[in-house]
Image (cartoon, rainbow, N blue to C red):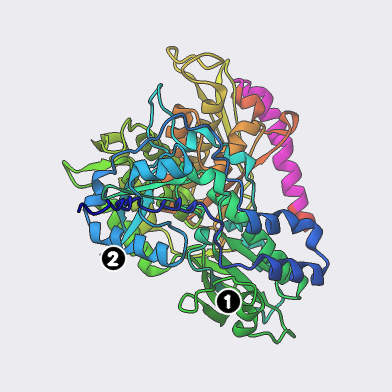
Amino acid sequence: MVAASVPQPTMVPPPVPPLPDPRQVVSPLDPDKVEAKLHELGILAQWQHVVDGLRSGFDVGATAPIPHSLQFRNHTSSELAPEFIDEYITQEQAAGRYSQAFDPADLERIIGCFRTSPLGLVPKSGTSKFRLVQDMSFPRNDPLMVSVNATINADDFPTEWGTFAQTSELILKLPSGSLAATFDIKAAYRITPVQPAQQNALCVFWRGKVYVDRAVAFGLRSSAGVFGALADMIIAIYRASGFGPLTKWVDDFLVIRLPGQEWTEADFIELTSRLGVPWSQVKTRPLAFCQRYIGFIWDLANRLVCLPKDKLDSILLLIDSWLEQKSTFSAHEAAHLHGKLVHISCIFPLIRPFLPSVSRFASSFHSARGRLHAPASMQSDLTWVRYIIHKLPNEMPLSLPEPLDIDWWGDASTSFGIGVVLGRFWGVWRWRPEITVGPRQEFDIGWAEAVAVELGLLMAIHHNLLSTRPPHRNAILVRSDNSGVVTVVNKGRSRNRNTNMVLKKIYSQCADQRVHLVAQHVAGRTNISDALSRGEVSTFLQAFTHILQRRRYCSLLI
């Protein structure tokens, strides 16, 4: 008897549930608590857009369509310490800012087309540590493919930063007895969430896997402005709560405690820690009369500012490394040098005419991977920068005294030459026949007026007008009726290369004399040296005799 056949069960695997969308809004700040605090302080209306960003993610401008997925090879610098990148990714995943690792095809099935930007490592100056760089300006100079940053306009994301000048102005207004503390937000940009729809453009590729980055990253053109809006809101909370004056530079907050106030560093941190702001305890610098902020040491009691010695020493070592023969440098290293020198020019303004060559070199790279020799002209400028830094004191008063008036007047004309008056001394120079000064010529009137300042400075040195000045009177007044030369002498730089060459000579002489010039604009009709610059010596002498007599009469009255 044949047994009845039994139908075999069909082995059909259960359907695999789709993977959840890894694009999420992640931030340590609690939008509900932030909103409640703003409402309590009566300032919610001004900051509702920031609360909305904390809830739904911030618009970072990465809205350009991605027609197909793009995965770029990471920069070779990422191979300097791959274990560092491994650890960084693990930390970001633990904080919820990176998604799990995906195979590229799997991620595309979940979120659609995406793109990555190359990773690289930059050594931190003076340490064995690294900083991870996400190169969102890659690719460069590619007509067929634009970078993430190329589609973002940074002007659409404005914010306020506490600059050197603003910090100086703030401290000068403080009453005696004021103290300052500084506070630092941990992983500042990374506490700012990105809108999920824009996270497709911010992915990271490492070891064959792709990670969705959910937070604002360093290297994104809009990052400073997006995080800046959040930091501006934090500043507003403190001001409305009775703290301050205070200012910020990115994640670094300078907070003043006025005489009569009694808050502590712990009070400051507690106010917004309850909202989720992750302050760094180890980077908090307690209340003091001297405080380090934006790379400078500010002396509130004596109204002085200087560079920390370790920072000054490291910059001098950096300059020395650029003066080594046969050395080559990357675009990042060139930009790093330029940024450092611009920064210290706040303390050493006499180096400013020597910086354009560094800026030109930094912008001359066509590839982020390329390495170039520093041109001889730039090395010459760096030699002068080093000389000036060694020559001048590492200290500057926040409030410069009134400039010393040695009765210095200068003028130039295109038709004749230059005239200079210094007190009872005067000089006149005529252009050589082969020199033509004027519009669309090699030498314009701005250059000529700068030469007038240079000749005046040499006259002042020759007649010992600077060596006999009163102690601590380092600012010297010079008058000109050309507003252009007034601007470039006071700023210390000119876009005109010939004018800038003259400024270099002026500023190097100023360094030797330990003075700086303060240019003042005067009307042409009142410029004593005007007739001299046109070669009208007799006309000048007639007027100058009366001027000297009037001065002598006034001195007798005094």
Query: Residue 186 versus residue 110: which sits nearer the camera?
Result: 110
The reply, left or right, for residue 188 in relation to residue 309 is right
Label 2, secondary structure: give it. loop
- Picture quadrant where residue 287 is located: bottom right
Of callouts 2 and 1, the N-terminal one: 2
Q: Residue 316: x, y in percent?
A: 31, 57
* Residue 352 visible to an observer of this rendering: no
Amino acid, disc 2 = Thr
Other-residue count near label 1 (Cα within 10 Å), few / some / many at <14 / 14–19 / ≥20: many
Q: Is residue 168 above or below residue 23?
A: below
Identify the disc placed on residue 37.
Answer: none
Residue at the location (74% across, 58% down)? 47
Residue 301 located left or right of residue 329 = right
The residue singled out by tag 1 in the image is: 181
Q: On the picture, is 210 further left or further right than 96? A: left
Magenta-colored segment: predominant secondary structure: helix
Q: Position of residue 378 (x, y in %)?
A: 32, 38
Instruction: Please give the range of residues in magenta.
Output: 534-554
For this rendering, which residue is in front, 21 or 302? 21
Find out whether residue 236 is within the magenta segment: no
CA distance for labels 2 and 1: 26 Å
Q: Outermost residue toward the front?
A: 1
Q: Is residue 431 above or below residue 252?
A: above
Tell me the SS state at disc 1: strand
Residue with the mark numbered 2? 127
In the image as oriented, which residue stretches furthest toward the right? Answer: 42
- The residue at 67%/82% (across/down) is 177
Q: Is residue 322 left or right of residue 113?
A: left
Considering only vertical position in the picture, is 533 above or below 391? above
